[in-house]
C-alpha cells in the first residue's frame, strides 16, 4: 500500500464527523496524556511509602471495585442529569482524588482515595459513550468509538513516556500533573462540548411525556443486551489476565522486568500505529462477526502464551495477536451497546456495560495471580483460550440476529419536490371527484 493510499485511508477515517466529537476526542487525549496515577501507583506505594506488594495489589483492586459502583452511577446521572454535567463533575472528582494522593500517606486514606477515584473515572465513561451515540450518525458510530479509543491509547503512550521522564521529580509531582490534566479535560468539556441528551418526547397537545423509569435490573431484563454484557465480561476477563499473568509468567521463565516492559509496550505501539488501519478494514462489517473474530484473537493470543517458553519475541507475538483483538472488540462492543439501548436510556445501558469491565478489572487480577502461583501459568493461559472460544461461540449463536440491523443501510432520502407536487395534485383531484 502506497503512502498516498495510506493518506487517503486516514483522511476517510477521520472525515465526516461533527465538530463536537473532535472536542470530546481532544478532551480524551488530554485526560489520558496526564494519566499517571495507576501507572505508577504500585511503585509509589512500595518504593516511596514502604507498603507491601500485597497492599499495593489490594489498592489497585479497590480502583476496579470503585468502578463497579461508578459505572451504573454514571449511567444514571447521564440520563437524568445530562451528559455534560456528569462529565464535568466526574472529571473534577477524579482530579481531586489525584491531587489528594500527592498529600495523603496513611494506608486507609490512600485506599479510600483510590476507591473514590475508581468511582469517578468509571462514572464518566457512560456519559462519553452516550454523547458519541447522540451526536454521531448511526452508520458512523463504530468509527467514532474507534477514533476515541485511539485517542485514549495515544494519550496513554504519551503519559507512559512523559511519566518515566517526570518520575525523577517525584511521584507526588506526577499526581499533581494528573490532576491538572484532568481538570483541563473538564474545562474543555465545559466550554466547548454541547449537551446532547435527547429532549423529552411530547404528546399531541405538546405536553412532555413522562419517560419510563429504567433501573439496572430493568436493563438486565433486556435479553439480547444481557447476553452482550455477559459475553463482554468473558472477553474482559481474558483481556485483563495478561496484565497480571504475563509478568509473572515471564518471571518464572527467568526473564527480567525490563523484558516484560518491552513486550507489553508492543500493545500500545500496535494500537497507536494501526488503529486507523483496523478501522478501515472492519468498517461496514457485521458487528456479530467482528465480536466473534475478536474473541478468537483473544483466545489464540493468550492461549499461545503457554507455548512462548523463554523467548521474548514469542511473548511479543502473542501480545500482537490479542492486541488486534482488542482494537476490533472495544469500539464494536461500544457501538453494539448503543445500538441496543433505547435513546432515553443510553447512559444506563453504557453504565451496565461498564460494570462488566470493572468486575473483570477486580476479579481477573486476583484470579490470575492465584492461578499462576497455584496450578501454574499454563493453566491460566489454557483457561483464557477456552473462555475466549466460548465467547466467540456465544456471539455467533446468540447475537447474530439481535445485531443484524447495526449495519443496515441509511434510510431513503425524502421525496423530491416535484414528486410532492404530483402527490398533492392527485389528492386534490380525488377530493374534487368525491
Image: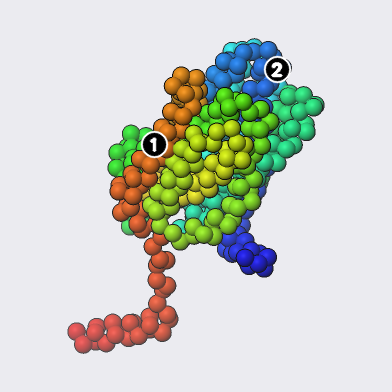
Residue 155 image offset from top left, x and y in percent: 66, 42
Residue 25 image offset from top left, x and y in percent: 61, 49
How is colour applied across the structure in the image?
rainbow
Q: Nearer the viewer, residue 384 or 155?
A: 384
Q: Is residue 125 above or below residue 42?
A: below
Q: Nearer the viewer, residue 213 or 393?
A: 393
**Extreme residue toward the left, this view:** 434
Q: Residue beneath label 2, please?
A: 47
Q: Is residue 93 visible?
A: no
Q: Nearer the viewer, residue 67 or 270?
A: 270
Q: Residue beneath label 1, please?
A: 387
Q: Is residue 220 visible?
A: yes
Image point (68%, 65%), residue name: 3
- Foreground: disc 2 or disc 1: 1
Image point (33%, 52%), residue name: 400
Q: Is residue 378 above or below residue 316?
A: above
Q: Residues within 10 Å of mark 1 (few under 14, many from 20)?
A: many
Amino acid at each position: 500500500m502506497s503512502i498516498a493510499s495510506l493518506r487517503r485511508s486516514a483522511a476517510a477515517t477521520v472525515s465526516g464527523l461533527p465538530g463536537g466529537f473532535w472536542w470530546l476526542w481532544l478532551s480524551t487525549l488530554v485526560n489520558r496524556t496526564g494519566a499517571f496515577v495507576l501507572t505508577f501507583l504500585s511503585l509509589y506505594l512500595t518504593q516511596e511509602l514502604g507498603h507491601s506488594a500485597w497492599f499495593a495489589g489490594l489498592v489497585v483492586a479497590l480502583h476496579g471495585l470503585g468502578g463497579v459502583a461508578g459505572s451504573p452511577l454514571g449511567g444514571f446521572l447521564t440520563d437524568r442529569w445530562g451528559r455534560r454535567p456528569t462529565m464535568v463533575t466526574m472529571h473534577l472528582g477524579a482530579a481531586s482524588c489525584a491531587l489528594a494522593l500527592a498529600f495523603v500517606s496513611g494506608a486507609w486514606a490512600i485506599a479510600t482515595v483510590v476507591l473514590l477515584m475508581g468511582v469517578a473515572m468509571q462514572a464518566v465513561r457512560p456519559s462519553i459513550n452516550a454523547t458519541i451515540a447522540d451526536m454521531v450518525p448511526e452508520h458512523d458510530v463504530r468509527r467514532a468509538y474507534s477514533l476515541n479509543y485511539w485517542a485514549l491509547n495515544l494519550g496513554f503512550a504519551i503519559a507512559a513516556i512523559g511519566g518515566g521522564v517526570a518520575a525523577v521529580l517525584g511521584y507526588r509531582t506526577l499526581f499533581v500533573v494528573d490532576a491538572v490534566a484532568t481538570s483541563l479535560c473538564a474545562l474543555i468539556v465545559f466550554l466547548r462540548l454541547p449537551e446532547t441528551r435527547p429532549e423529552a418526547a411530547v404528546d399531541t397537545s405538546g405536553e412532555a411525556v413522562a419517560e419510563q423509569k429504567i433501573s439496572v435490573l430493568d436493563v438486565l431484563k433486556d435479553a439480547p443486551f444481557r447476553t452482550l454484557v455477559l459475553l463482554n465480561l468473558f472477553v474482559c476477563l481474558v483481556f485483563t489476565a495478561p496484565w497480571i499473568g504475563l509478568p509473572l509468567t515471564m518471571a518464572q521463565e527467568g526473564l527480567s522486568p525490563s523484558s516484560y516492559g518491552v513486550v507489553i509496550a508492543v500493545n500500545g505501539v500496535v494500537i497507536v500505529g494501526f488503529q486507523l488501519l483496523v478501522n478501515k478494514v472492519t468498517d461496514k462489517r457485521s458487528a456479530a462477526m467482528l465480536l466473534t473474530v475478536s474473541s478468537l484473537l483473544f483466545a489464540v493470543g493468550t492461549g499461545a502464551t503457554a507455548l512462548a517458553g523463554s523467548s521474548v519475541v514469542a511473548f511479543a507475538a502473542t501480545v500482537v495477536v490479542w492486541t488486534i483483538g482488542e482494537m476490533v472488540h472495544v469500539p464494536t462492543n461500544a457501538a453494539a451497546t448503543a445500538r441496543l439501548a433505547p435513546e432515553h436510556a443510553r447512559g444506563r445501558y453504557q453504565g451496565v456495560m461498564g460494570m462488566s469491565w470493572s468486575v473483570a478489572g477486580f476479579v481477573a487480577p486476583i484470579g490470575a495471580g492465584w492461578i499462576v502461583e497455584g496450578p501454574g501459568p499454563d493453566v491460566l493461559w489454557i483457561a483464557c483460550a477456552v473462555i475466549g472460544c466460548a465467547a466467540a461461540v456465544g456471539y455467533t449463536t446468540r447475537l447474530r440476529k439481535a445485531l443484524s440491523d447495526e449495519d443496515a443501510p441509511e434510510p431513503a432520502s425524502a421525496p423530491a419536490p416535484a414528486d410532492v407536487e404530483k402527490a398533492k395534485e392527485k389528492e386534490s383531484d380525488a377530493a374534487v371527484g368525491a
